[in-house]
Amino acid sequence: MENTRTCKRCGFQSVREEQLTNLSLDLIPGGSVEKMLENYLKENEVEYKCPCGGKVSGISPAFATLPKFLILHLKRFRLTDYGPEKMDEPVQLQRDLVMSSKLGGGCYSLVSTISHIGNTDRGKKITCLQIRDELITVNRPNKYRSS
């Protein structure tokens, strides 16, 4: 991932690259994974003291190259004043996801999902694998309980 910081006052840019194995995406209720990824890649404003005297910069993430495998984590839990809360809103999953990087584009195919059934206190994880055109569900018999 390549993060470009741009001073809002003078336009000076600095670039930092980082290696990522997965991306954690904010859940958009009723949204698609494509929309969540788009949201992740949008520019965010940050406080940063530039030598020109500017105090605000924008940080824009972009894929320098596309990884061989793309692992996306959808953040389904949020912290509220009363503790963690699970967001049960449905998400639109596409079988294929077309993406671009600074060196070109690529297409990822959905291979598996891991879903959490339950709430913040107890639950169960269900894994679904896409093998050829068949969807296989693997139920993990062990339920867990947080302490």
Image: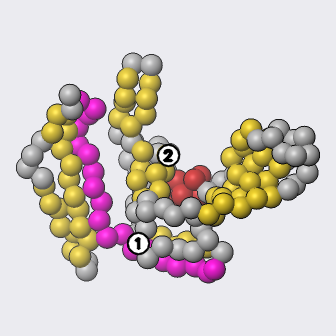
Judged by its main secondary structure, the magenta piece is: strand
Residue 147 place in picture, x, y as percent: 20, 28
Q: Earlier in the sequence, mark 2 or mark 1?
A: 2
- Residue 139's place in the image compared with 62, above or below, is above
Whether the residues at callouts 2 and 1 have beta carbons within 8 Å, the answer is no
Residue flagged by tag 1: what amino acid is it?
Phe
Residue under numbered circle 2: 26
Relative vertical location of residue 102 with respect to residue 31 in this rendering, above or below: below
Task: Give the amino acid type for the residue marked by disc 2 in the picture.
Answer: Asp
Regarding mark 1 in the picture, which secondary structure is present there?
loop
Task: Locate residue 26, reporting x and y percent.
Answer: 49, 46
Is residue 116 in sight in this rendering?
Answer: yes
Q: Which residues are magenta?
A: 103-121
Q: In front here: 92 or 8?
A: 8
Determine which residue is flagged by label 1: 69
Query: Alpha-carbon neighbours of circle 1 within 10 Å: few (<14), some, or many (≥20)?
Result: few
- Spatial CA span between label 2 and label 1: 20 Å
Name the residue at 62% across, 80% down: 104
Q: Is residue 72 left or right of residue 37?
A: left
Task: Please check the rendered image and state whether residue 117 is part of the magenta-colored stretch, yes or no.
Answer: yes
**Mark count:** 2
User: Is residue 1 depicted above or below 55 in this figure?
Assistant: below
- Secondary structure at badge 2 equals strand
Q: Is residue 147 left or right of residue 82?
A: left
| Quarter of the rendering occupied by the N terminus | bottom right
Q: In the image as oriented, which residue stretches furthest toward the front?
A: 51
The scheme the figure's colours follow is: secondary structure
Q: Residue furthest left?
A: 141
Please report the residue visible at 48 percent of the width from the left and 73 percent of the height from the top: 67
Q: Write the residue at 39% across / 19% down.
A: 82
In the rendered structure, the answer to whether residue 136 lies left or right of residue 89 reads: left
